Amino acid sequence: MKRTAKPEFLRPPAFAYQCAVRGGAQPALFCESVALERLAASHGTPLYVYSAAMIRERIRAFAHAFRSVPHTLCYSVKANSSLAILRLIARAGAGFDVVSGGELERVLRVDGHAAKRVVFSGVGKTVPEMELALRAGILLFNIESASELEALAETAARVKRQAAIAVRVNPDVSAKTHPYISTGLHEHKFGVPIPEAGTLYSKAAKQPYLRVAGVSVHIGSQITDVSSFAAALERVAGLVRTLRTEGHDIRYVDAGGGLGISYEGAAENFAQRISAYARAVLKPLRRSNVHLLLEPGRSIVGPAGVLLTRVIYRKTNNSRRFLIVDAAMNDLLRPSLYRAYHEIVPVTRSAEDTETTDVVGPICETGDFLARDRELPVVREGDLLAILDTGAYGAVLGSNYNTRGKPAEVLVDGAKARVIRDRESVRDQMRLERL
Ligand SMILES: *Cc1c(COP(=O)(O)O)cnc(C)c1O
């Protein structure tokens, strides 16, 4: 699909073109009050840049949309696990959804008291990870199989810590998203089929160190049709009723994450999107009287980040145009992995003319592309581009393929910008190797 990078393109409030104060200059892209060109000049490229104001604002929007019910926002750490961003989110009052012991350690590192707002998800929790979470005293374990339930019961008894549990059910609902990030169909590895959940709850209720506390569901990611959430939560609400008749004390419903964002350039109306999402989630639960847990990741941090990259070379092969840039699939995997679309804009707008081109990295793989057949304003070698909406599943999916160091990361807050992760050197990469 061809997209035009509209010159009037804006991502309010965090990323927008502004004119430099002293007259005549071309409009240039800013993050809050900081010119992206200046950040690239000081810190090099590729460079991730995040807006603190935008992250805070999106957390506030969630709180506002769900203000009518008792709820806890448990930000999904896997979307972006930078310590500075986790601290910002903790300070905004949110809790966390972790899917590994490592993520839990990150959370505890930024906020020693955060455990009571942490839920632990994932199909393959190991005993050491369970032990870490039990000792930290987390809010809830989302259990995904009978074997896992058994392992947790044994571990909890051994360390003498109570574990509050929910069973993550698989509601057999299509999320209408990319197959790799859809999780709620019966053929997926995630969750427990609803008809089998009752058995797990009865088993859990017999365990002295387990406390049945909730029902969880998560049907996938980048979901823009909110009716999928409504369908999943209808089934969850039904299960809550059944479990309560059987005597289980269900206090929590964990509705998971998955709310999609607008990657395709249309300035999104987040307030509208989130209120539609809240309606879809809340309507099936309106008589359930539960404490709602929400696990958004992408919708909090996705639009709050850009990846800055410089054009190294222009090249034409048999009339196919390429912009070879210094960012690659090791920095941003989503286009290669999911054929995901990310808007790309020049940081300084100069040319009026556009051209159709591929935007590719230096890695020795044909799959190393950031955009294909993209209509972009004509840019020169050395120009700076911003790849938008890369705050979620960007840096975290990075690798060292081709011995490329992970990019530096900068967090902007108003007029302040600070490095929150240094650029990785080759020495850093070789540190754990032995000759
Ligand atoms: C990935 C994940 C999330 C977050 O999904 P987003 O699409 O980023 O909102 C929430 N809960 C669980 C269990 C997940 O695996």
Image (cartoon, grey):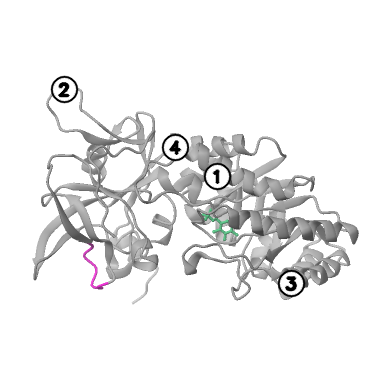
Q: Tell me if residue 361 is in the magenta stretch.
A: yes
Q: Quadrant of residue 237?
A: bottom right
Residue underneath mark 3: 151
Which numbered disc covers residue 110? 1
Callout 1, which amino acid? Val
Tag 2 residue: 22
First-in-chain label (1 vs 4): 4
Specify whether 207 is left or right of 405: right
Are dots 1 and 4 in contact, CB under 8 Å?
no
| Residue at the spot of label 4 | 54
Helix, strand or loop at disc 4? helix
Discs 4/3, front: 4
Q: Nearer the viewer, mark 3 or mark 2?
A: 2
Q: Quadrant of the N terminus?
A: bottom left
Residue 60's spot in the image, x, y percent?
A: 55, 35
Q: Which residues are magenta?
A: 360-366
User: Which secondary structure class fits the magenta region best?
Assistant: loop
